[in-house]
Amino acid sequence: MTAYPQLLFKNRHLGATVSLDDYRKSGGYEGLAKALRELSPAEVRETVKASGLRGRGGAGFPTGTKWTFFPSDQPGEKYLVCNGDEMEPGTYKDRVLLETDPHQLIEGMVIAAYAMQIPVGYIFIRYAYARATAALERALAEAKAAGLLGANILDSGFAFELHLHGSAGRYICGEETALLNGLEGKRPNPRSKPPFPAVRGLFGKPTTVNNVETLASVPHILTGGADWFKGLAATEEGSGTKLFGLSGHLKKTPCLELPIGVSLREVVEEHGGGVWKGRRFKACLPGGASTPYLRAEHLDTSLDFGPLEQVGSRLGTAGVTVFDETTCMVAATLNLSRFFARESCGWCTPCRDGLPYVCWLLEKIEAGQGTLDDIDNLRGQKHNIDGRSFCALAMGAMGPVDGLLRLFEEELIDHVKRGKCPVR
Amino acid sequence: MSQLLDNETIAAFKAKTAAVAHPRELVIDLLRAIQEQVGWVPDEGVELAAEILGLPVIEVEEVATFYDKIYRQPVGRQVIHLCDSICCWSRGGEEVARHLRQKLGVGFGETTADGAFTLLPTCCLGACGEAPAMMIGRETYGELTEARIDEILEQKRKTI
Ligand SMILES: Cc1cc2nc3c(=O)[nH]c(=O)nc-3n(C[C@H](O)[C@H](O)[C@H](O)COP(=O)(O)O)c2cc1C
Ligand code: SF4
């Protein structure tokens, strides 16, 4: 198998959760030392910007840009929040990262806090991640005891306090403004944007929200340099390595670190060992439950932000879920739609009422009782929901529906014409 | 009902409430602590949390009822959350669900007659590489087969 440079998973061979000692032996906290001793906050922001790092939480916003927009020089309360909600079906990379080497996140957060001159941070972690939570609790205690958190970090005069918040379920908590409400102890419905969190975030103060993997990548950028990090990508436009979580109908379903921009074919055939049971590849979700499907003709697409958008999908969270030839795509889309309908926070009508209607249409079609009008109706719902919901949950829900309508229209029509599911 | 929280824990939360700038942020910690003690969060639990945090009861209730891992109804001694999201679905999740229902003799949202287990569906547990998966209490079990489920349930029954 092709061996690639490992940053986030470089200590994975150790087997157990990496301790502070082992993390330091592998060069841990050297990025922080470099930032605090050699670079100004603005220089750290510029380094991250030059690296081309893009957010790993799903939206792919350039991290350095987010950091340079932040009112770093504004005195007073400001917050850094790590989004560890990770509840998008098909996504489990942040869990593996935290269970493996949690100090990377802490180091990345201290560097980010220094870069934006933020005194207080929170890690928001989902309920189901009990092991990752335990790993983080231990790492936080180790870091505090070693003077890597708290007052006067590494004798630099910089202080940063970091708290862990355990949540209690619900996918919408991963949406950054809902997450902020959740952290404040309010009902976690999303907030309207603008004002963006950088202006009015946690407790009404300027706040930066970043994903676990995004922040954990930062120490490596500091130690290796922006150009080196950017050059790790498999594509010219890409930057860095990326964690891919494989799932679905593959022989092997590991979570692994690969150059961003590797081809879907390599992921499926090499790292996933090919489609299971000797069957053929029918489709995949390239980046979690909210990304439109890809088909066999897309196998040579690079798994990076730009190339995936060009073929009508998204990199999302890079959780690759594969479906073999026996899968009914109407049934798969129904399963996905039910997830989004159930996880809707109920705040706005297109989502709260539109998603159950989408489910009802798909149920009808899957049961063989659909009409061609129902398919048109499904298309109409996509139009009604996309761009009209209060937050991006409902738009994400329309990702697979869009893929179904574009790539599997014949299969939809077949359901109607035969009066039954032609696949199952 | 057993006591909602022991006096020590109540005192600790009161001290924390006094020490932090925004006491409301402790509401999930508090509800989770009550649930750990009682098994679920009864009305009195919501009232206690409101009292400790100095919030109107309704503002705790609207938080408590939002989250699916906070139980506002009585549950069995163990709660089984079976993932029904796409990766588990693609690897036999529906058959696993059928087997669990049959084995326990209950449907989703129900508790076994002996009060041992409550069965609930859940969205993705982040165990997609080991699908199908379920969570019992705080522990996740992957690569479920009928035989493995039987084994896990038997072992759980012994501990509760
Ligand atoms: C419904 C919904 C759920 C989301 N869940 C997560 C999540 O679990 N983790 C995450 O990092 N970002 C999630 N996001 C994206 C966040 O809103 C935000 O863009 C991200 O945390 C920013 O970090 P990044 O720039 O480092 O990616 C979600 C967005 C939506 C709309
Ligand atoms: S789109 Fe859905 S999740 Fe987002 S605010 Fe509207 S109802 Fe809530």
Image: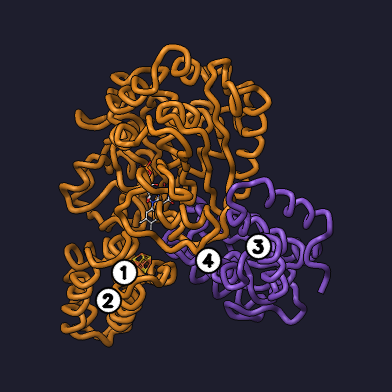
Q: Label for residue B122?
A: 4
Tell which circle, 4 or 3, labels the residue nearer the N-terminal end. 3
Quick check: do tags 2 and 4 share a chain? Answer: no
Q: Which quadrant of the view contains residue B60? A: bottom right
Of the pair A328 and B80, the residue shown nearer to us = B80
Q: Position of residue A112 (x, y in %)?
A: 43, 30
Which mark, residue B86?
none
Same chain under badges 1 and 3? The reply is: no
Q: Position of residue A198 (x, y in %)?
A: 36, 43
On the same chain, marks 4 and 3? The answer is yes
Q: Position of residue A305 (x, y in %)?
A: 24, 42
Q: In this rendering, is residue B136 above or below A220?
A: below
Q: Quadrant of residue A290?
A: bottom left
Q: Quadrant of the N terminus of chain A?
A: top left
Distance from the alpha carbon under mark 1 to that under mark 2: 8 Å
At label 1, counting other C-alpha atoms closer than 10 Å, the crowd grade (few under 14, some 14-19, many 20 or more) is: many
Circle 1 is placed at which residue position?
A328
Residue at the image point whose x is 44% and y is 25% from the top: A219
Along the line of sight, the residue nearer the viewer: B99 or A398: A398
> Along the horizontal axis of the image, is A197 left or right of B110?
left
